Structure formats: structure tokens, C-alpha cells
Image (cartoon, rainbow, N blue to C red):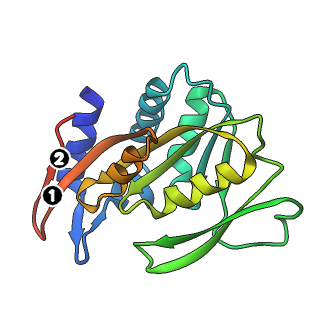
């Protein structure tokens, strides 16, 4: 709980609210990375999913990679990331899904090689933000295509007021967010009590 309060304080002190319900936390999370904070996030998420027999962490490029790496390191498991475009080095059995990015206002064909996720895996999906749930739904589809088991999803910052996390929880999917913003205006935000 102490770590969650620290993250909330960083969001309040360094976050910038931009038009369109966008929260910019580039000073510590996804452009400039506070390595101590990311390590603490990884440790906390690993603690939350301890005992779930996670074999791999899955994220989407690019902002989720740092947090996913910290989680994978804390859990001692590999990290796989979905590429936002097909490329010549992703061949063979390809797992794919369409994901609409709220931030970039664009739909991506995300891809993962089937060599990296199999039916033997238990996957923990990790990302930096959760808004409407588009990225998570796309990654969940990839886990399903692989025949892998989904342990759940872990998020640094959830925009609870946009409903994506609650919709996933209503489907029975475990979603653990380190900070949940329940209300955001042009000049303030409020966190969900945890």
C-alpha cells in the first residue's frame, strides 16, 4: 500500500493532464524512466501474482516494455512483447490481433511469434496504461490463440472512469492496477481507494 501511495503522489506532482482525457507521465514512466520506480512496480506486481505459476510476461510495444521487464526480472521469467506491425523477422506461426490505440487514434495489427507463447504457458499481461481495454483485449486474444492460460493483467495506471478495467473484471479476468484514477478533469484527478 505504501508503494501505491508513492505512485499516486508521483502522478499528482509530475503528471500533466492533456486535452482528450490524456495523462502525460513521460517524466517517470514512459519517455524518461525512473528506474527505481519501475523496479518497485515490478516487485509489487510480482508480489501480487506470486503463486500463480506465471511462465511468461506479455506486453505490447513500446511503453509497456520497461514495466514488463521489471516484472519478468522480479519473477524470473521471460518477457514477450507484441509488435505493432508485422515484420520480416516474425515468421512461421504468427499470433495476431487488431488493437485500437486510444492515445495514437490508430488501429494496429499486433503480432507475436507462436514460438514464444505456447499452450504450456501461463501468461501475465503487463502494460503501463489501461483506458478502454483495447490493448489488453488484443493481448488476451493472442494468449487465447496460443492456447495458453491467462493469469491476469497488471497495469501501472488505470483510467477507471473509462471503464476498460471494470469491463474485464466483469468478464472474470483478474486485473490488478497499481493506481486507478476514478475522475479526471482538465485540472484535477481523483484516485479510487484501494
134 in relation to 124, above or below: below
What residue occupies the far top of the structure in this picture?
51
SS state under label 1:
strand
How far apart are the two marked residues, 1 and 2, measured between alpha carbons? Answer: 7 Å
- Crowding around mark 2 (Cα neighbors within 10 Å: few <14, some 14 to 19, many 20+) is some
Q: Nearer the viewer, residue 146 or 42?
A: 146
Q: Is residue 53 visible?
A: yes
- At a point 17% along the width and 47% down the height, the residue shown is 191
> Could you tell me if residue 60 is visible in this image?
no
Residue 88 is left or right of residue 160, and the answer is right
Where does the N terminus fall, quadrant-wise?
A: top left
Name which quarter of the figure residue 77 lies in: top right
Q: Residue at x 84, y 72 (%)?
A: 88
Q: Residue furthest front?
A: 171
Q: Position of residue 152 (x, y in %)?
A: 51, 39
Q: Residue 183 got which mark?
A: 1
Question: Among all residues in the image, which is located at the extreme right?
Answer: 92
Local crowd at mark 1 within 10 Å, few (<14), some, or many (≥20)? some
Which percent across, then down, holds residue 61?
Answer: 59, 61
Q: Where residue 76 sits in the image (x, y, percent)?
A: 65, 27
Height in image: 194 above or below 182? above
Left/right placement of residue 22 relative to residue 74 reads left
Q: Residue at x 74, y 49 (%)?
A: 146
Q: Position of residue 44 (x, y in %)?
A: 41, 29
Disc 2 on helix, strand or loop? strand
Q: Which numbered disc, 1 or 2, marks the residue that appears first in the sequence?
A: 1
Task: Judge left or right: residue 127 versus residue 9.
Answer: right
The residue beneath circle 2 is: 191
- Nearest the viewer among 164 and 193 is 164
Amino acid at each position: 500500500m505504501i508503494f501505491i501511495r508513492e505512485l499516486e503522489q508521483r502522478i499528482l506532482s509530475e503528471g500533466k493532464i492533456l486535452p482528450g482525457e490524456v495523462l502525460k507521465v513521460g517524466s517517470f514512466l514512459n519517455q524518461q524512466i525512473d528506474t527505481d520506480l519501475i523496479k518497485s512496480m515490478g516487485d509489487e506486481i510480482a508480489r501480487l501474482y506470486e503463486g500463480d505459476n506465471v511462465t511468461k510476461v506479455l506486453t505490447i510495444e513500446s511503453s509497456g516494455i520497461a514495466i514488463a521487464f521489471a516484472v519478468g526480472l522480479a519473477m524470473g521469467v521471460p518477457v514477450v512483447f507484441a509488435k505493432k506491425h508485422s515484420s520480416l523477422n516474425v515468421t512461421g506461426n504468427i499470433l495476431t490481433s487488431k488493437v485500437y490505440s486510444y492515445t495514437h487514434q490508430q488501429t494496429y495489427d499486433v503480432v507475436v511469434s507462436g514460438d514464444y507463447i505456447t499452450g504450456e504457458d501461463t501468461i501475465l499481461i503487463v502494460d503501463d496504461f489501461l483506458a478502454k481495454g483495447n490493448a489488453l483485449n488484443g493481448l488476451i486474444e493472442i494468449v487465447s490463440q496460443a492456447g495458453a492460460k491467462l493469469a491476469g493483467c497488471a497495469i501501472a495506471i488505470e483510467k477507471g472512469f473509462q471503464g476498460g478495467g471494470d469491463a474485464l473484471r466483469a468478464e472474470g479476468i483478474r486485473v490488478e492496477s497499481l493506481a486507478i484514477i476514478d475522475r479526471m478533469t482538465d485540472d484535477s484527478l481523483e484516485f479510487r481507494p484501494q
